[in-house]
Structure formats: C-alpha cells, structure tokens
Amino acid sequence: MTNEEIIKAIEEMSVGDLAKLIKSLEEKFGVSAAAPVAVAAAPVAADSKAKAKEEEKTSFNVMLKESGDKKLQVIKVVREITNLGLKEAKDLVDKAGSPEAMIKQNATKEDADQIKAKLEEAGAVVELK
C-alpha cells in the first residue's frame, strides 16, 4: 500500500472511525498524538499570518482621532481632502474619535500617508486602519 493510498483511505473515514484509528495507533506504538505541540505552534502561526496580512495591506481608512487645538485649520484641510462643504467638514471634525470620523476610505498607502501628514500638520491626530 502506498502513502497516497493510505492518505486517501484516511480522507474517506468518518470522524469517529478516525478517532478510533488514532487511539489504536497510540496503543500499538506507545505514543500519543502531538496535539500539545500543535497548540503551542498555533499562536506563532497566527502571529505570522497577522504580520503578513499587515504587510500585504494595500488600502487604508484614514480616521480622525482628535481635532487638536487648531480645529479651524483641521476643518480647512478636511474640506480640501474631501471636497465637503463648510458645515459638513465641521460636522465631520466634531465627530473626531468616533467611527463616523472617517476622512477617506480605501486609500492607497501613499494617499493615506499624504492625508495623514496634512492633517497632522494642521494639528489633528490621525489613525490609519
């Protein structure tokens, strides 16, 4: 029997039959399943996946966290970036820190960095998500 045939046979087993097979193998060879090793490795794998996902991220949401001391300057920059009217820009700046204070959605990394720089220069606190 080849390895491929064994794997195919295992794939076709029910969960209950597979559990019985594992128990029989453990008893036959005096070993136990390596679940503790897999559990210990899981956080590392999850952390690696999260880092890879951050590196692969191509679009960003620019969120206004705080308007800062120069609120009028921040409103002007928001108007410039979003093409909103004065009232709409003011309302957006007033919502700083809330999920509704999104300045730009799905911006490229370059655009998001430029927007963040403009807003921070005006005195705002900005977060890229």
Image (spheres, rainbow, N blue to C red):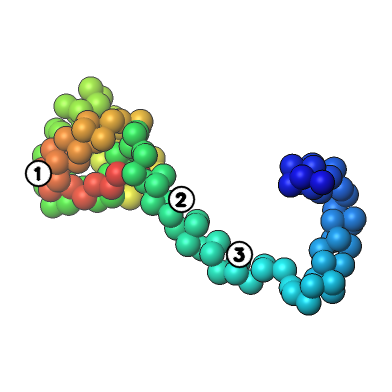
Q: Say which mark, if any, is on residue 38.
A: 3
Upstream in sequence: badge 1 or badge 2: 2
Instruction: Provide the secondary structure element on which disc 1 rests.
Output: helix
Residue 51, compared with residue 38, is above or below; it is: above
**Quarter of the figure with residue 19:** bottom right
Callout 1–callout 2 Cβ contact below 8 Å: no
Considering depth in this image, is 123 or 14 the residue closer to the camera?
A: 14
Q: Which residue in the structure is indicated by mark 1? A: 121
Q: Position of residue 7 (x, y in %)?
A: 76, 46
Q: Position of residue 115 (x, y in %)?
A: 19, 35
Q: Say which mark, if any, is on residue 49.
A: 2
Pointer 1 local density, CA inside 10 Å: few below 14, some 14–19, many at least 20: some
Q: Separation of disc 1 and disc 2 at Cα?
A: 34 Å
> For this view, does 75 lie left or right of residue 103?
left
> For this view, does 26 lie left or right of residue 57?
right
Considering depth in this image, is 24 or 97 the residue closer to the camera?
A: 24
**Quarter of the figure with residue 8:** top right
